[in-house]
Amino acid sequence: MAKKEVFVSYDHSEDLHYKNLLREWDANDNFDFEFDQRSPNEPINSVEAGKIKESLTKMMKESEYLLVIIGKKSHESDWMNWEISRAKQSDIKLKLVAIKIDSSYTTPSGLLSTGAIFARSFTRDGIIAALNSANNNY
């Protein structure tokens, strides 16, 4: 069985620890988590943003899922909002999965009314179960 390709969207400045946990779990035989290693510190409207968006789009097109790690400030992140919006476009149309680090954190608006599957806990098994349940019917 081929690995399921997962593009991970997270707030680079706030939630790096959780991305690192996923990296440790990346040895799973069924899933291959993809990360943008450059941690875009550039504003989304900067001169360099076009190159970053092009690279992110390429990675998304090679993926089947978008896993959104929702931290305290995720709903404010222009990059995360762009990634969610881009993942839903017809040339990519990724299956949407999300996990809130804390249940009180605000869901990014782009995930609302999409049918995104939410993992019940930030555990390897919880996230894999959510990925296995995901579809792209939005």
Image (spheres, grey):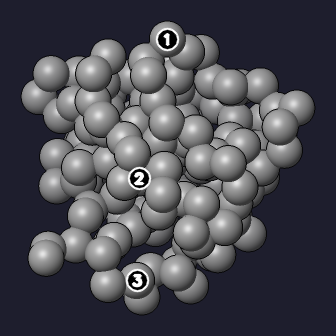
Disc 3 secondary structure class: loop
The 10 Å Cα crowd at callout 2, few under 14, some 14 to 19, many 20 or more, is: many
Lower sequence index among marks 1 and 2: 1
Count of numbered tags:
3
Vertical position of residue 39 compared to residue 87: above or below: below
- Which labelled disc corresponds to residue 28? 3
| Residue 128 shown left or right of residue 2 in the figure | right
Q: Amino acid at mark 3?
A: Asn
Q: Amino acid at mark 1?
A: Ser
- Residue 73 image-quadrant placement: top right
- Residue 17 in view: yes
Q: CA distance from mark 3 to mark 1?
A: 30 Å
Q: Residue furthest top?
A: 113
What residue do we see at 32% from left, 16% from top?
A: 138
The foreground one among 19 and 79 is: 19
- Which labelled disc corresponds to residue 131? 2
Residue 84 in percent (x, y) is at: 43, 30
Vertical position of residue 54 compared to residue 109: above or below: below
- Which labelled disc corresponds to residue 113? 1
Lower sequence index among marks 3 and 1: 3
What residue do we see at 30% from left, 75% from top?
A: 30
Lower sequence index among marks 2 and 3: 3
Q: CA distance from mark 1 to mark 2?
A: 18 Å
- Which labelled disc corresponds to residue 37? none
| Residue 125 shown left or right of residue 14 in the figure | left
- Residue 46 in view: no
- Residue 85 image-quadrant placement: top left
Disc 2 secondary structure class: helix
Do callouts 3 and 1 mark residues in contact (Cβ within 8 Å)? no
Q: CA distance from mark 2 to mark 3?
A: 13 Å
| Residue 70 shown left or right of residue 126 in the figure | right
